[in-house]
Amino acid sequence: MNQVLRIGIPKGSLQEATFALFKKAGYEFRMSSGRSYHPIVNDTEIEPLLIRPQEIPRYIEQGILDAGLTGKDWIEDNGSDVHEVAELAYSKATHNPIRIVLAAKNGSEISTAKNLQGKRIATEYVRLTQRYLEKHGVTAQVEFSWGACEVKVPELADAIVVNTETGSSLRAHDLKIIDTLLTSTTRLVVNRTAWQDDWKRAKIENLAMLLQGALNAEQLVGLKMNVARRDLEAINTLLPALKTPTISPLANGDWVALEIIVAEHTVRDLLPKLKRGGAEGIVEYPLNKVVY
């Protein structure tokens, strides 16, 4: 009987970014229908389930899922006992972490946690917020909200605890950040019993390596060029390579082929310097995976 790894894929705002990352890692998902919770993937050893990220840590801890991708914020809010395999720093808009923040209306009297005494707080992060209040010795009413917390201040709530990636939604609703409860990134986590299974552990480790390799590659590009040997030392001083460049002889013994991997954001400034330094036939190419 074939073994299968049951893995939770976050449904909602992170869904498309997760599918895109898996595709770069070599796993292509297709939805059998718009409402399906069972995507089809090109690996018969993986059984994916599309589930809200808030629920994934709980299902993994209970053994309903073997593994899954979810935010550190939801692991902490659930208080789930799961094993973290890898941190995968991606989100729906950027590669930056998200922050779980306490926010209130600009101009309100709330400027510290202590000002929350007796107030009403709307949030999806009920347990995380309650622990934050306990830490600060504050008693307040914490109400669960099905998202869209920003519109509830100040009529329905005095403050909110929400996640923010860029802060744009908070600014749009004239809200100020009072404090940061947690900084969160996506994590690949696994049920502790599944982690003791040799086959599942190897499968998850392979998956983690490929996903991290795909993430690494998103920030990097390859460069190839031809360099005259007389210019090689000068060109080498310009190269911010991961380690050292690969240098290969050409048919013309006075020239070599040079290949490096560099951060994509450096190429704009680097290419003119390489050209002026004597490099010729410079080619930039994308990368799919980089495994360190």
Image: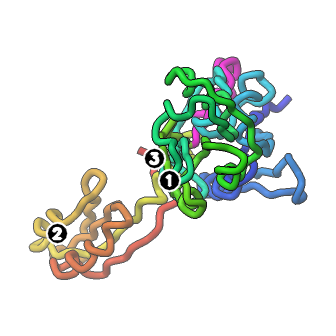
Q: Which of 265 and 155 is in front in this view?
A: 155
Number of numbered markers? 3
| Amino acid type of the residue that numbered disc 3 sits on in the rendered structure | Val
- Give the mark nearer the N terminus: 1 vs 3: 1
- Mark 1 sits on what residue? 107
Kindly identify the residue that appears in the image at 53 percent across and 40 percent down: 184
- Give the mark nearer the N terminus: 1 vs 2: 1
Q: Give the number of the mark in front: 1 or 3.
A: 1
Element marked by disc 3: loop
Element marked by disc 1: loop
Kindly identify the residue that appears in the image at 69 percent across and 58 percent down: 16
Q: Is residue 285 above or below residue 177?
A: below
- Mark 3 sits on what residue? 291
Few, some or many residues within 10 Å of mark 1 (<14, 14–19, 20+): few
Q: Give the number of the mark in front: 1 or 2.
A: 1
| Amino acid type of the residue that numbered disc 1 sits on in the rendered structure | Gly
According to the image, what is the colour scheme of the structure? rainbow
Residue 61 highlighted magenta (yes or no)? no
| Amino acid type of the residue that numbered disc 2 sits on in the rendered structure | Ile
For the record, the magenta segment spans 186-205
Residue 44 visible in the current orientation: no
Quadrant for the N terminus in the image? top right
